[in-house]
Structure formats: structure tokens, C-alpha cells
Image (cartoon, rainbow, N blue to C red):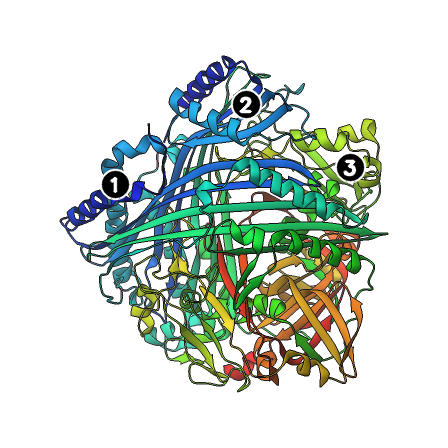
Amino acid sequence: MKTVGELARAAEAALALIKSRPDVREAEVFTSANSALLTRLNYTSHIPCNGVEEPKSTESDGIGIQAVFESERGALIGFGSEPSDLTPAGAERALGKARKAAVADPEFVSLPAPAFAPRVLTDYHDPRVMELDDASLVDTGWRITGGALRTFMASGRLAALAGDDEALRRLGLILGGDVTILRERIAIASTAMPRPQTDETSLITAFATAMVESQGAKGSGASTGTRLDHFTDEAGVDAAQNAIGAIGGQRVPSGTYTVVFGRQPVADLLNNIVIPSCTVGAFYSSSTPFLGKLGRAVASPLLSLYDHGAMPGLMGSKGITCEGLPTGRTDLIKRGVLVGCLSNWYETQRLLRDPAIAEKLGAAAPEAQAALVPRNGFRFGAGGGRQFDSPPGVAASNVVVEGAEPVNLDELLRRVGNGLYIGRIWYTYPINGMRAGDFTCTVVGDSYIIRDGRIAAPIKANALRINDNIATFLNNVAGVTKDVKGTIVWAADEVVYAPEIAVTSVHVDEIAGFMEELD
Amino acid sequence: MKPISVDLIDTVTPIAQERVRQARRLPHLRYADLRLEVTEAKGAGAENGTPKFSGDDYGFALGVRVLAGERMIAPGYVGQVLGTADVADLDRIMREAIERAYRRAMVNGERKADAREKYGALGAALADTHLHPIPALQDTVAAVYRVDPRTVELAEMVRYATDVSRQVAAVDGRVKYNYISTLTELSRELFVSTEGACIDQSFALTQGTCSVVTVHGEVSQDLYDAIGHQRGWEILLDGATELPLTFPAFRDFAQGLAREGVELAAAPVLPTSDGDVVVVTDPHYNTLLSHEIIGHPVELDRALKMETAYAGRSWLLGGLSDHQIGRRVASPLVTAYSDPALPGFGHYKYDHEGTPGRRVVHIDKGIFRGFMNSRQTAAIFGGEPNGHWKATDASLVPLIRMSNTVFDAGARAPEDIVKEVDRGYYVAGHRTPSIAESRENFRISARRVYEIRNGELGRLYRDGGIAADSRDYLVNVDAVGSDFRVYPIPNCGKGQPMQTKRLGNGGPTMRTRARVIGG
């Protein structure tokens, strides 16, 4: 994997080469090296399996150039990239592609200019993660699998259900999930910011799902971190314990309930609906439920939401954006009021000049500026990594949810009295488009019936569908817990530091009754 | 340095074959395969009638799988993105990739053997990794196109996309936003294995996508759709008339979507029914339905629990001897299958482990018959491999993916299926899905829902769709049309890290009973 020094020297040399071209008015060089190491886990007691299914990796490095060319047609903006070559020859090829691809985008204003705020996060990666060998990669996967298998074997409840060791296998004990280790290095230099800036990030996530399938019981476990010495078998152990705890799950009739959303559902709803609704592009295209509502209430006063890419120790933190701008805190919803949007340089510049900005955002350009600071211009690829082969998009980093007057979970359950605790949802989408805000999802595990202010019984997995609107989730907040925990959802860019949130009047429908006939 | 083109495969094939032959000498190596892929792609995008991007670039990727182990056999993988600068060094790169995948497999095999000894009865489920035997084939498959993607001028693509975008914007003042994207590419995939397979397949692919947002008062309708085929640029200009894959020229298609958005933004929200009502679904809606409730649950990796933590399981299989094969899961009118021989995005001759793709019938006149599989899953579950192990690019590990998964045609005239309905709903065009974890329940929204009264289509509704339990829905089908169509699905996500893949789905007009559900 290329060092940050090599990436910085390549960016500097490429910028020098570009500056020598008379037709280039502005340019930005982005070099990166990414490595994703991943072990995918698959243990099934009743089906022959590998335990650790896929120890694998994908690696890439290269150079991306965004340049503004002077032409007879005026300024043309283009992007080109070249993989696996950080030499001037590679830069030459990337520049050639950018020139060939350049278009006359009338909304383009300029490439990013230096920010007034200084960078706050440096040297926050773990060098040991950067040097992980093949055996250690495989071992991380077996550590999680081993944690789950030990927990299953030590369970008196499973032993009582099975009767003997051989029958334990017939319970259908499952462990799935992965350990993902992302290593990202970047350098960026531009005509506006010629001194190369670098960033180096490492992070480890473990995500596990366990089942006692014969009992329809499912549980999850996860851990996130930025240091290898913090990595344990916690995710496997938690998943297995939660699956065992879910045995005896009950069906819940259709109706309207007060629901305590656990951390994964909060993260899932944010990832699929709330965060996309807070990106500047959703306002530009008139497709957000918050259209024209900057400075107005969009949620309960109990709820605040911000993105913070520069908080030390949080998993999604970065020193700089992929535009070379400092990361930092962007308040999105403050005590229920919409106060900001996630943006990058291009999107901010064009929305500030959009004649319809007041209609779209709810504020005119001078007032809007503070809400559109470009702290979220990232080039995340599928599966992670900061990709040299694409111009910056908009993505969240660490999204933190905070509640006013937070309480501990026991107190929240007491306040709820009777309702549902929903700990894991699945396939959450804005089913009728983003602006309508209607969403649906199913409840897939880690969920319980709340009776008389206490957790009373597990809810059967895959037997409940939520059909509601995001306005219910945001406005009917009855309470929020104190503790937030880093939570990741499948294929998401960001990490949500989520509390548990109690919401009144949530509509759920009982589903899949025919599955009982199959048992 | 010579630019990378698909012709590179001619040069590297003997080197790759020799590298894989040499790999056989590694101690305890049982199997290895290597995939190389080169893509030459051009794309252009426009927004609200102005150009936004274009690109003319190549992709070059390598993937290696090794099965090895001294005490137990286990898999190891490596994936890598390559560039022009790597061409001269490809022999070393391929050797090192094989060695690295081999090291991972060897360590994985040792850890699996340790775990098998350590975890008693639960350890007994850990098994050697075997592949079902297939003939080792050598073949070359040519791409099909009239206008070679490599010959299309990038400037012409920009002009065309911008022109289409401008015409979409001009449809109506209520079209507030549109984004038009076009792509044409030629790719070539090489597969070689230690068993002696050497398969060289080429594909042309062209796609157009349209996003449009229409606004009427407080209502925004954001619609998205795509057309595409494994053909050249001609399919955007002329459309496709290759039954069952038909679509209009892209310009007409995009304008049609805009007109639909305008009409829908002014329509009322679909009222939710209290219970099941008669619904007639059109081929486009059934395209997503066949994808979600037929295609995904018949992927054998999912059914064998390998996706428990991500894409979910399948209600069609509990264990190796506990499944729905041979049981009724649908009305006798329903037949469904996957077939790589059908035209469109899901067409291919061989999958990514060299297995010839063949039609696999999932439901035959209502009786469940079997799964799409891979060599590994066929070895576990039984049955012949049917060629559905596919990756999004060579650097990624393949998964079981749909080819073209469809509901088969029936004998009824579609207009008669509507005429017979006294009161019901006609559900047309798919929009957004949300499916339960084992695919036992779904809610899928439609673009348009019409009331049916006395056999005639009546009032148009927006923001509505169908919610049902999958088996009940299929069992209640009482009419199947003769108007069988296949449509492209441009973005199916599965795996960890998520791989987004193009494939095909389809079906005819069908009638059944379900709950209609609005916003």
C-alpha cells in the first residue's frame, strides 16, 4: 500500500505538471490508496459450512484530476483518473482524460478555495492496522466466530432445549456477519491550495447476526473502532447471547403502539431517510420532506442531530474532506429546528446562486450560507475507501443524535409503560419517494414487548412490518436515552452515534402468519 | 505506454493460464481460479438541460480464488484494481495474488481444523470446501452490437444527454428537476482455472437512466427508471424490439416519465384498503415483484444462510432436508424461472466460475422446484450447477445472482384480465420495494395505481402499492397474461461489501388479491 508521503509527492508533481499547461485555469489533484480487508463469516450448525467464508481483500491506488480548461466555448470542467500509476505519466493520462471529458457546466463556480477554519484532526490512525498480515486477517474472523460458538456451547437454555450435544446442532445455530478493516490514505493539492494535504484513516468494524433458527430467534452484535488492540470477540458473543435471549418470541397484533427504537433502527431510519433528506442535493432537486423549511421546526424539540467528521475516536472521523477542506461539526436539526445541510463545495456554490433558493431551502443566500458549509465532500466508494476515480459527492461522516432531557433505558421503559422495543429493522425505504416521507420496514430481531414499564417478552422475528411516515418518528418523540453508541448499517457511508428513542403512535402490521404453518 | 483496451486479454491469456498451471504445484492447493476483466466505457450526464459530466475510461481488475489446506480445505480470495502501468508487470502481479489468496486459504484451513476440534458437536458442522464437478471448458464468446461502444464520440454523447434533458425539462413547467445519464461500454472477461478452463467472454452494454422530480403545490413526485440492453449505442437512439425485451428510444422514454410525473403530482394519494382486494399488476410492476419474491429467495447462498447478516435468508429452505421443493407455493397458473439465455442485462453464456448458464425452473405450475446455485452451494445441497455465480467486477468475490428471473407467460389477453374485474385496482410500473428478511412478505410501491370499476380503468392515484405475504399472493393468482416482457434492473445490491449489479427480470400481466396501501 502506498504511503502518504508517496501520495503527497505524486500530488505535488502532478500539480506542477498541470500548472505548466496554459489552457488549465484551475486544477485539483487527488491521490489515494485504499485497502479493504474483509472476512465474511458463515457458521451454520445444521448445514456444512466454512465458519470463515471469505477472507478477502480489494486494493487500489491512483490519481484523480479535476481541471478547468479555457476554451473557445468558455470554461470547461472535466475529471479524469488513472489507476495504479502515481508517476507523471499517470498524471498525464488522467489530465488527458479530464480534458477529453470536460463539459461546459453553467452552474460550476470554482474548485474549492481554502477554508477559514483550521484542520483539527491529525495522526489518528493505528499503524498496526495499516500493516495487518494475512494470518491476522483470518484470525479476526475466527475470533468473532469462536466467541459465538463458545456462547452457544455455554448456554444452559440451549442445552435444555436440545437435550444432548448432537441435538444442539439441530437447533439451527447460525452466525453470519463480517469483520471489515478499511485502510485509507489520501493526498490532495490544488491550484487554490498548492501545499499537499494528507490524511490517513484506519477502522475496524465487526458485525454479527446469530440465530437459533428452529426457534425463530435472532440477535445482533457489533463493534466499531479505529485500533486493532481494541478488537475483541464482543460482536460474536453479543449476537449469540441476544439470539438465545430471543427464544420464545411472540407475535404482536397490528395496531398503533409507542415504540422504543433501538440504536440500529435509529441508525437505519437516519441512513435511509433523514440524512438523505438533509443533503443539499435533495433541496436543489425539490425532493426532501424538509423543502423550504430551514429555520423551521421539522422534529420534536427533544431531538438534535449533527454530523461531526472531526471528533477524535469516532469511527467515521477524517482529518480533511476529499476536497481538502477541514472536517467539522454541521448541525442539521437543533432542538427540532432544521438548521443546516450536508454539502460539498460544488453543491454549496450552486445552491447559493440558485434563483429559487428561498423556495427550496427556506432562506435567501446570505442567511443560507451558514447552513451550507461544505464539510462533507467525500469520494467514498462502495464498501468504503476514498476513491481517486470519482469527483467528490456528499456523504455524512459521524452522525450524532442527541436528546434533550435524556434518561437511562429503564426510565424510558417506565415512561412508555406499554409498547414495543424494536432493536433491529430491515429494508427501510421511503416507499413513496423522499418528500412524501412514507416509510416501511420489517422487524427482524432484537425486539421485545414492553409491559408495565419493563421488557416482558421477545417479539418473534420477521412477524411485524412498520408502515408509517418519517414525520411520526421525528415529531412524536416521547423520550431519548443518554447513552449513544456507534452503529453501522449495511452499505452505509456514515456511522450513527445513536441513542434509543421512544416514539408514540407508530403503526405496525402483523405479517407472514403462513410461516407458522411451515414450522 | 499503450492505452488499455479489451484486446489486452489476447496478450495476457497465455500468461494467466501459465500462472494458474504453476499454482497447482503449491502444497495442499486443491483448486485455484483467476479472473481478469477489461472494460472500455463512455458516459455522459446532464441535469436540467445542462451538461454535467462525461467520461471515457477503462477498467481493469483481477480476482483470484484459492481452495487449499493441509488438515481442512478452506477458501481464500484476493481482488485488485489494475492500471496501464501494471501491464508490463502482470505476470508478477498474478503470481503474488495467487500466493496471497493461497496463504489466506491455508491459514483459514488450519483455523477451521482447530475450531472443528475445539467446539465439539458444533465444530462438526465445519466442513471442507468442495466444488461440484463441471467440465473444464475453453470458449470464446463475442459481444453483440451494431454501433461499437468504442466508436461513439464522447462529445456526441454529451450533446445527446443534454438534449434529452432539455426536452424533459420542456415537457411541463411542473418538471422542476431532471437528471439524464447515458453509458455505453464494451467489456471482456477472462476466466482460467487449475482444472483447465479458459473462457473469454465479451459483452457490449448500453444504458440510459432518467430521474425526474415534478412538483404540484406541496407534492413532489420523484421518479426514476432505466432502459438498457447488452447492445451498442443504437439501443438508446432506436429503442429495442427484441421480444420479450422492448422499449422505446431513450428520448421518448424520458419524456414519457416526465409526463407521468406531472400527471401523478396532481393525483390523489391511494387510499389504503382494509383487507385484500383484487389487483391486476402490469409487466413492469411484476418485473420488480419477480426480482424480490422469486429471484432473491431462490438464490441458494441466501437459502443456505450465507447472507443471514445482510441480504437475508429464504423462507423456501430451513435446512438440507427441510425445504419447499416439491410443495405448492403458488397457484397452478404460476411458473417462474431464471434464464441467462433471455436477452437483456441478465444474459450470458458462462458464469464467473466457468459454469454454462442454463434455465432453472423455480416454480412449475405452482410447485417449487429449485434454486439458482454455484459449484460450492451445489456441492452442499445437491443438484447440478446451473451457472449463477457472478461478481460485479473481477476484483470482487462472486455471489449467486439472478440472470433473468421472470414469471412465465400465461395464455390470457391482458385486457380481458382487467375487463373481468368489477372492483379492484390496476397497479402499473414498479417504484420502491421493501421485502421481509426471508422474502416471506413484501410491500412494493407502484408508479401508478388506477381504480378498476366494472372492467374499466378509472381514477389515477399516486403514492400507492401492494403489501402481502409472498405465498398467499402467489397462491391467489387467478389470471396470467400472454404479454410477457423483460426489463432491465440496473442496481441490484447484495454481498458485503455490497455489489451493485445489472440483471434482468420480467413477467406478464397478472391478477391476484392483496392489500393496497397508500401514503
Indicate the quadrant containing the C terminus of chain B: top left, top right, bottom left or bottom right: bottom right
Judge whether A7 appears above or below B217 on screen: above
Q: Give the numbered dot on residue A439.
A: none
Disc 2 packing (10 Å; few <14; some 14–19; many ≥20): many
Q: Give the numbered dot on residue B11.
A: 1
**Residue B35 drawn at (x, y percent):** 31, 49
Residue sitting at 73 percent across and 43 percent down?
A285
Q: CA distance from mark 3 to mark 2?
A: 30 Å
Snapshot quadrant of residue A253: bottom right
Q: Is residue B229 visible?
A: yes
Snapshot quadrant of residue A193: top right
Identity, as a three-letter code, of the amino acid under mark 3: Val
Identity, as a three-letter code, of the amino acid under mark 2: Glu
Q: Give the numbered dot on residue A339.
A: 3
Q: Are the residues at dot 1 and dot 3 in contact (C-beta closer than 8 Å)?
A: no
Q: Mark 2 highlights which residue? A: A28
The extreme right residue here reads B217
Residue sitting at 60 percent across and 50 percent down?
B209
Identity, as a three-letter code, of the amino acid under mark 1: Thr
Judge whether A475 appears above or below A29 on screen: below
Residues at marks 3 and 2 on the same chain: yes
Q: Closer to the camera, B319 or B170?
A: B170
